[in-house]
């Protein structure tokens, strides 16, 4: 797109926003500082690099078989860098334990060490990217239906050891990048059918977490993620929302809100202000559930918009970590990264452009009509011109231009895999 045209449109938008008291230059600076944590698992359908990687388990599923999946660490790194080059701003990379640099060696989950992530740490530094981390309880012979809440001490201790070691890896990443590594713990534990020992498994999970978190670290932050149900684990989830809210609030841990992990009409945005009153920060897994936790590519929709607006309305940009979490294997995977990231950023931009001072004033003085009218008008203000300017400034393709870049990479790289 013509630079001149983008600049002209931006100038007009800038004036229009100034009329409602919004400084678009300041908003562009704020958006520049919003980093997303790109989930490494979109590139390879959550397979990872364990030498004997088996089928995806733990109640999650990547559907589709679009060609070009990243099959090894080099391909995944190349894909992530390609995606990042089409996303404005500076972003982080979110790794799972199963993506370690194990070579041909079989390193079991209870044997992982920071050295298995040294090449990632070096790569991240060389590419000016920060890392986040996740323990991996799924796709392993010992995963079963219960990991950290397993009544069998051998299995439970195996996963306790795994998660403890993952925290040490996250700490090493945090030290190396001089910025805390955000480590998420999600375990799939649950059961398919009527469950009578609900309390027992939750007691075990609570005890496992207490053991895991006994070591204090300064360069990593712990997050815990709940969900409603998994495939094959429909009747009971040990780590439910209530469980982790209680755990997080009582232990000062960060609760991860995955937008696909709640009942379909529940507002995830509404949870942010409550959580921030009782827990230090919030981690998000931005996704798009379609009928269930289907992990479709994030798009601009009411849910994502409301989520971003709640973050800015709570003045919580520095307390909310924004990770993405979807895995669509049915379309070009690099394209999936770019669509979801840019959509999240576009939602955040609209949130930052909101005339919140006026809206608050209307609300506090009982001016319900005025509040609703301004909220409606905001929807059609020229935020797209500000977005184009953001892309231009960041030297990434403007508008639909990135489609051609993704296609070119497909012809030259992913289609040859
Ligand atoms: C699963 C959780 C979890 C995973 C990733 C791979 O339902 O959302 O966050 O998607 O850890
Ligand atoms: Zn998630």
Image (cartoon, rainbow, N blue to C red):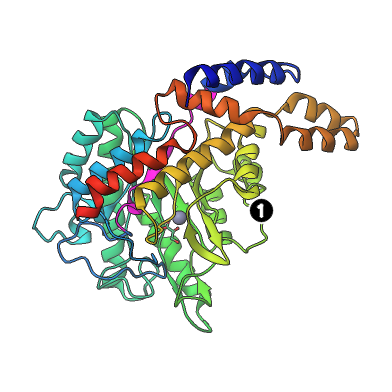
- Is 181 or 411 nearer to us in this picture? 411
Residues 33 and 207: in front is: 33
Residue furthest out toward the left? 104
User: Where is residue 355 drawn, in percent x and y?
Assistant: 73, 26
Q: Residue at x 54, y 60 (%)?
A: 289
Quarter of the image for the C terminus: give it.
bottom left
Residue 47 at x, y = what percent? Answer: 27, 61
Q: Is residue 376 left or right of residue 214?
A: right
Residue 272 percent across, percent down from the top left: 62, 44
Task: Answer yes or no: is residue 181 visible.
Answer: no
> Magenta segment: does it hold 144?
no
Q: Nearer the viewer, residue 13 or 142?
A: 13
Residue holding disc 1: 267
Q: Residues within 10 Å of mark 1 (few under 14, many from 20)?
A: some
Q: Count the labels in the image.
A: 1
**Residue at the image position 31 percent from the left and 27 percent from the top:** 178
Q: Report x, y in % for residue 226.
A: 50, 59
Disc 1 Cβ-to-ligand 2 distance below 8 Å:
no
Ligand 1 located in image quadrant: bottom left
Does 269 appear above or below 189?
above
| Kind of element beneath mark 1 | loop
Quadrant position of residue 215: top left
Is the residue 69 above or below the residue 406 in the image?
below
- Horizontal arrangement in the rendering, residue 327 relative to residue 381 (left or right): left
Occupied quadrant, residue 19 = top right
Residue 194 can be seen in this image: yes
**Which portion, as a residue range, is magenta?**
30-44
Q: Is residue 253 left or right of residue 181?
A: right
């Amino acid at each position: 797109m013509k630079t001149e045209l983008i600049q002209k449109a931006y100038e007009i938008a800038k004036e229009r926003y100034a009329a409602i008291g919004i400084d678009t230059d300041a908003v562009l600076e704020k958006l520049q500082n919003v980093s997303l944590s790109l989930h490494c698992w979109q590139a390879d359908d959550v397979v990872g690099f364990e030498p004997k990687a088996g089928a995806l388990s733990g109640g999650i599923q990547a559907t589709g078989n679009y060609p070009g999946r990243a099959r090894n660490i080099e391909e995944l790194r190349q894909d992530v860098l390609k995606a990042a080059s089409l996303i404005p701003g500076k972003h982080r990379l979110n790794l799972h334990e199963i993506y370690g640099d194990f070579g041909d060696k079989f390193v079991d989950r209870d044997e992982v060490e920071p050295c298995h992530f040294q090449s990632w740490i070096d790569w991240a530094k060389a590419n000016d990217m920060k890392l986040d981390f996740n323990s991996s309880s799924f796709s392993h012979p010992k995963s079963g239906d219960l990991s950290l809440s397993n009544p069998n001490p051998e299995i439970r201790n195996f996963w306790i050891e795994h998660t403890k070691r993952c925290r040490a890896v996250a700490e090493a990443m945090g030290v190396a990048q001089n910025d805390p590594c955000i480590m998420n713990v999600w375990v799939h534990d649950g059961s398919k059918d009527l469950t009578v020992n609900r309390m027992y498994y939750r007691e075990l999970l609570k005890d496992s977490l207490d053991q895991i978190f006994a070591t204090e670290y300064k360069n990593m932050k712990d997050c815990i993620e709940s969900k409603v149900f998994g495939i094959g684990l429909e009747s009971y989830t040990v780590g439910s929302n209530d469980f982790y809210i209680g755990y997080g609030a009582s232990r000062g841990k960060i609760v991860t809100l995955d937008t696909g992990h709640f009942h379909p009409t529940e507002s995830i945005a509404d949870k942010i202000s409550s959580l921030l009153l009782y827990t230090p920060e919030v981690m998000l897994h931005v996704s798009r559930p379609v009928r269930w936790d289907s992990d479709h590519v994030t798009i601009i929709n009411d849910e994502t918009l409301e989520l971003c607006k709640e973050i800015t309305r709570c003045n919580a940009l520095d307390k909310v970590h924004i990770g993405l979490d979807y895995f669509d294997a049915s379309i070009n995977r690099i394209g999936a990264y770019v669509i979801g990231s840019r959509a999240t950023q576009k939602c955040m931009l609209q949130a930052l452009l909101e005339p919140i001072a006026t809206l608050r004033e209307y609300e506090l003085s009982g001016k319900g009509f005025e509040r609703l009218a301004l909220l409606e008008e905001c929807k059609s203000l020229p935020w797209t011109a500000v977005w184009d300017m953001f892309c231009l400034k960041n030297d990434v393709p403007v508008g639909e231009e990135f489609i051609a870049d993704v296609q070119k990479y497909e012809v030259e790289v992913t289609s040859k895999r």
